[in-house]
Image: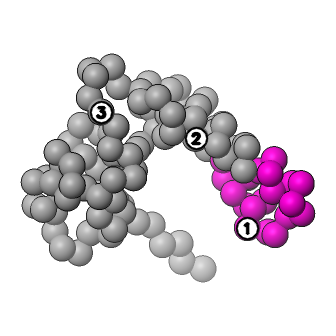
């Protein structure tokens, strides 16, 4: 079986990647590789549990684990950068200060 890997464009400051024109906050690069991997493993296990059609009481727990992992990774909640710049997570790139950068990307970007 072939695994499809997408390489999403990353903003020049490394804060976001873009999928279908929308900015998504990247994980905090200051996390140790071990901590980051542990959190990613927890996140993906919880997402798999949600996809398997778990009972409602397990789904609530899995959602809480997803949220906790994303907060710990820095993908949600307070921003991980310290220069005071605002967060544009989940915003359309064309409506942010990244608009010119985004417009210059090749049209075949995911």
Work out how far the residue at label 3 is from the one at label 1, CA to CA, in angstroms: 33 Å
Quadrant for the N terminus, please. Answer: bottom right
Q: Which mark is residue 70?
A: 2
Q: Which residues are magenta?
A: 43-62
Q: Nearer the viewer, residue 30 or 20?
A: 20
Residue at image position (21%, 55%) is: 95
Q: Is residue 6 left or right of residue 76?
A: left
Residue at image position (50%, 26%) is: 31
- The percent coordinates of residue 91 (x first, y second) are 33, 53
* Disc 2 secondary structure class: helix
Q: From this viewpoint, is residue 41 visible?
A: no
* Disc 3 secondary structure class: loop
- The percent coordinates of residue 96 (x first, y second) are 21, 49
Q: Which mark is residue 86?
A: 3
Residue at image position (89%, 63%) is: 55
Reply yes or no: does residue 101 show up in magenta: no
Contact flag, marks 1 and 2 (Cβ < 8 Å): no
Residue at image position (69%, 57%) is: 47
Q: Nearer the viewer, residue 71 or 36?
A: 71
- Nearer the observer, disc 2 or disc 3? 3
Work out how far the residue at label 2 is from the one at label 3, CA to CA, in angstroms: 18 Å
Q: Is residue 65 above or below residue 103?
A: above
Q: Which residue is mark 1?
A: 51
């Amino acid at each position: 079986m072939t695994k499809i890997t997408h390489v999403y464009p990353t903003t020049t400051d490394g804060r976001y990647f873009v999928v279908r024109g929308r900015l998504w906050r990247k994980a905090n690069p200051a996390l140790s590789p071990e901590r980051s991997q542990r959190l990613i493993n927890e996140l993906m296990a919880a997402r798999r549990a949600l996809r398997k059609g778990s009972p409602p009481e397990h789904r609530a727990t899995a959602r809480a684990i997803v949220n906790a992992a994303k907060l710990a990774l820095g993908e949600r909640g307070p921003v991980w950068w310290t220069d005071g710049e605002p967060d544009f997570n989940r915003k359309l790139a064309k409506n942010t200060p990244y608009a010119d950068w985004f417009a210059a990307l090749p049209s075949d970007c995911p």
